[in-house]
Image (cartoon, helix red, strand yellow):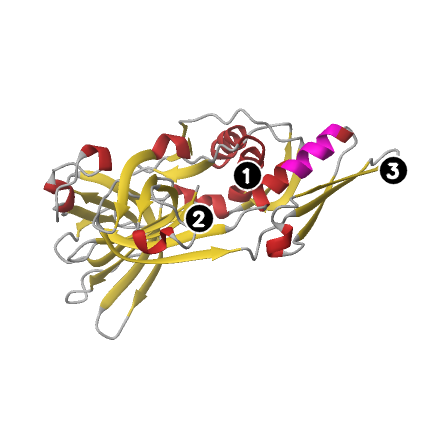
């Protein structure tokens, strides 16, 4: 592994790539006893995802029929002396070789529950704080989202979707992206991706083991129509935003959306159409990468990519990308499978 300078994000510190499992414990929900399985746990995968709860999967041998995990057992994993995961067993499988295969989730898994809320005008951080307090899960608001979405009633939606909807609406209007991040101590944190920006540079000679590039217009729109009908007066307002620059190349990719409510004016309808066009009128470029292990790389982190093989096909030199999903494979050698998107 070559030494990389600080400007490229990799200091000449090989300890970053020599980390090891220092402690792995399972607390039995029934006996209250703590089992240290550091020496026997293997096939550990730590998965962070912008669209889902963090997940930890791992295998442990049963060992003379003595080790029996239960759903609800607490799992704590330390890597190089740092707690990177605190969660609970949600699935346990035992095979003919006496091997337990377990799946554990942190507190954010409980946001998969559903509920009903009558929301006032509120931001994603407002919604998250209220939900976390109501269902009594540990949380922190590290970054406040100041953009408030209109009042609405959500029936039967997941708690995650209630928060994510407000966050995505804010991103459409402001460009700032907020998400929920699981911390090693078990808290769920509301953060902005701006907090996790780095100056890392990955590329031809910088830590990349394998890669795959993708560019798609399957979900692209270059003609966006927004329709609003006043619920009281029944008066309809329509505005269409279009990009005549991409239509000759991609054809007419049409998206129509309806706004509800009675206090929406013509300017708001136009603003919504134009913001949707800015969001949707792009070629979606993404990478999947496998890199050498680094704990600093997780969902929500951004870095730069420079690979000469793809410069000519749509990914210019020093393109900034955002990690949408990271799977740490704590094998030997330790590697990380990444799904990233250009930003």
**Magenta range:** 267-274
The residue where tag 3 is placed is: 234
* Residue 281 left/right relative to 339: right
Disc 2/disc 1 C-alpha distance (Å): 15 Å
Residue in the image at 49% along x and 51% along y: 284
Residue in the image at 39% along x and 57% along y: 213
Q: Viewer-proximal residue, 44 or 324?
A: 324
Tell me where residue 222 appears, x and y as whole percent. 64, 48
Tag 2 secondary structure: strand
Visible residue check, residue 264: no
Disc 2/disc 3 C-alpha distance (Å): 39 Å
Pointer 1 and pointer 3: residues touching (CB < 8 Å)? no
Query: Of label 2 and label 1, which has the lower sequence position?
Result: 2
> Residue at the bottom extreme?
96
Q: Report the disc number at residue 52.
A: 2
Q: Main secondary structure of the magenta part?
A: helix
Q: Viewer-proximal residue, 202 or 15?
A: 202
Visible residue check, residue 26: yes
Query: Of label 2 and label 3, which has the lower sequence position?
Result: 2
The residue where tag 1 is placed is: 168
Look at the picture and state if 250 lies above or below 223. Answer: below
Q: Viewer-proximal residue, 273 or 112?
A: 273
Report if residue 239 lies within the magenta region.
Answer: no
* Residue 336 left/right relative to 153: left
Tag 3 secondary structure: loop
**Quadrant in the picture for residue 12:** top left
Q: Viewer-proximal residue, 261 or 156?
A: 261
């Amino acid at each position: 592994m070559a030494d990389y300078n600080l400007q490229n994000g990799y200091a000449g510190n090989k300890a970053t790539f020599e980390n090891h499992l220092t402690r792995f414990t399972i607390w039995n929900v029934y006996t209250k006893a703590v089992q240290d399985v550091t020496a026997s746990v293997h096939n550990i995968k730590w998965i962070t995802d912008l669209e889902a709860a963090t997940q930890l999967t791992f295998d442990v041998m049963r060992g003379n029929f003595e080790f029996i995990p239960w759903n609800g057992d607490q799992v704590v994993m330390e890597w190089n002396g740092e707690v990177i995961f605190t969660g609970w067993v949600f699935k346990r499988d035992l095979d003919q070789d006496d091997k337990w295969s377990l799946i554990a989730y942190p507190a954010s898994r409980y946001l998969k529950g559903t509920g009903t809320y009558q929301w006032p005008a509120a931001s994603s951080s407002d919604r998250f704080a209220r939900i976390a307090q109501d269902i009594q899960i540990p949380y922190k608001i590290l970054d406040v989202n100041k953009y408030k979405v209109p009042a609405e009633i959500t029936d039967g939606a997941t708690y995650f979707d209630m928060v994510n909807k407000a966050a995505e609406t804010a991103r459409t209007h402001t460009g700032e992206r907020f998400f929920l991040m699981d911390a090693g101590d078990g808290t769920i944190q509301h953060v902005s991706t701006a907090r996790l920006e780095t100056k890392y540079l990955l590329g031809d000679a910088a830590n990349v083991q394998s890669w795959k590039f993708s560019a798609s217009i399957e979900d692209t729109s270059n003609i966006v129509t927004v329709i609003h009908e006043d619920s009281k007066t029944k008066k309809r307002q329509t505005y269409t935003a279009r990009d005549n620059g991409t239509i000759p190349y991609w054809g007419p990719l049409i998206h129509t959306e309806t706004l509800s409510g009675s206090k929406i004016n013509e300017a708001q309808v136009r603003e919504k159409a134009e913001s949707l066009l800015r969001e949707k009128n792009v070629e979606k470029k993404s990478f999947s990468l496998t890199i050498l292990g680094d704990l600093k790389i997780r969902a929500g982190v951004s870095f730069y990519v420079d690979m000469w093989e793809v410069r000519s096909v749509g990914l210019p030199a020093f393109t900034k990308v955002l990690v949408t999903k990271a799977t740490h494979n704590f094998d030997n050698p330790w590697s990380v499978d990444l799904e990233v998107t250009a930003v």
